[in-house]
Amino acid sequence: MSVQVVFVHGIRTSSTMWRSQLDWLAENGIPATAIDLPAHGMRMDEDFTLHEALHTIDAAVRDAARHGPVLLVGHSMGGLLSLAYAGGEDTPPIAGVVAVSCTAIPRGAALRAYRVLARAMNSLPQRGQWLTDRVLAATLPVDTRGDFAAGGYAFDAQDAALSSLAALDLEAALPRIRVPLWFVNGQFDQLRVNEALFQRLAPHAELIVVPHATHLVTAMRPTVFNAVLRLALAVVDARSRGRADRAHPRGRAAPAPDYW
């Protein structure tokens, strides 16, 4: 059974932010699903709630787990939700987690400042879309520049989504994550603020810092990020096959896929 990948997008954007990764995985014959959280993408007409967001992740994971071990990959808000889900009191059916651009505890002064900034952007003409477009044009490669906007921007859901994140108890969740875990940050990502704390809470996790990248590391350095996925896939696959061999010592395992 091959490793299945489930992607969870960040705030405001949608499943389209993962187009580069989905294309690469498809070229390599690796099954993958990118979900839209409530109030985002194809679900823009819904309200955002923490319960429904976590339920959406759970439904996608459980569906994928019917076909093989699941690697859960989340960016920014999606990364925080994925960590909270992975470290829930009821252990979910996942085999690994890649948490991208999300090593920050979402509460207190930092969260309040983020919400103020988001409201200020929304108050600008066209909700600051012109500024966002200029920043993306200056920082992202042509091939990935349109991926964040392709599914639309969830401007109306942003404040509700940000405020709901304060209810996540990541200090409790992170120590409960027993599967392979990677924290992936761009060198200049503003959400690296609690990077050391996250490492203390999950000492088995591996930290990967991508040089010359910002918060949008998946689109800014897609080849590098896909290499991280390749590593995670290989680790999850090897662990899964090892468990299968121990469970059936007389059987012969299928050849490992060539992720490299």
Image (spheres, rainbow, N blue to C red):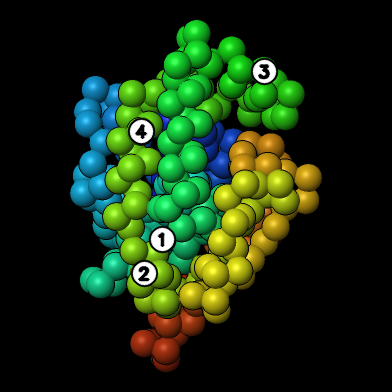
Q: Which mark is residue 83?
A: 1
Q: Quadrant of residue 89?
A: bottom left
Quadrant placement of the C terminus: bottom right
Q: Is residue 137 left or right of residue 160?
A: right
Q: Name the residue beneath numbered marker 2.
A: 173
Residue at far front of view:
109
* Label 4 close to label 2 by CB (< 8 Å): no
Residue at far top of view:
125
What is the spatial separation of the Cα atoms under label 1 and label 2, in whole angstroms?
7 Å
State whether residue 114 appears in this view: yes
Q: Amino acid at mark 4?
A: Asp
- Secondary structure at numbered mark 3: helix
Q: Name the residue beneath numbered marker 3.
A: 134
What is the spatial separation of the Cα atoms under label 4 and label 2, in whole angstroms?
24 Å
The x, y position of residue 246, in whole percent, is: 42, 89
- Tell me if residue 199 comes above or below residue 57 in the rendering: below
What is the spatial separation of the Cα atoms under label 1 and label 3, in whole angstroms?
31 Å
- Whichever of callouts 1 and 3 sits on the residue coming sooner in the sequence is 1
- Whichever of callouts 3 and 4 sits on the residue coming sooner in the sequence is 3
Q: Which mark is residue 159?
A: 4
- Secondary structure at numbered mark 4: helix
- Secondary structure at numbered mark 2: helix
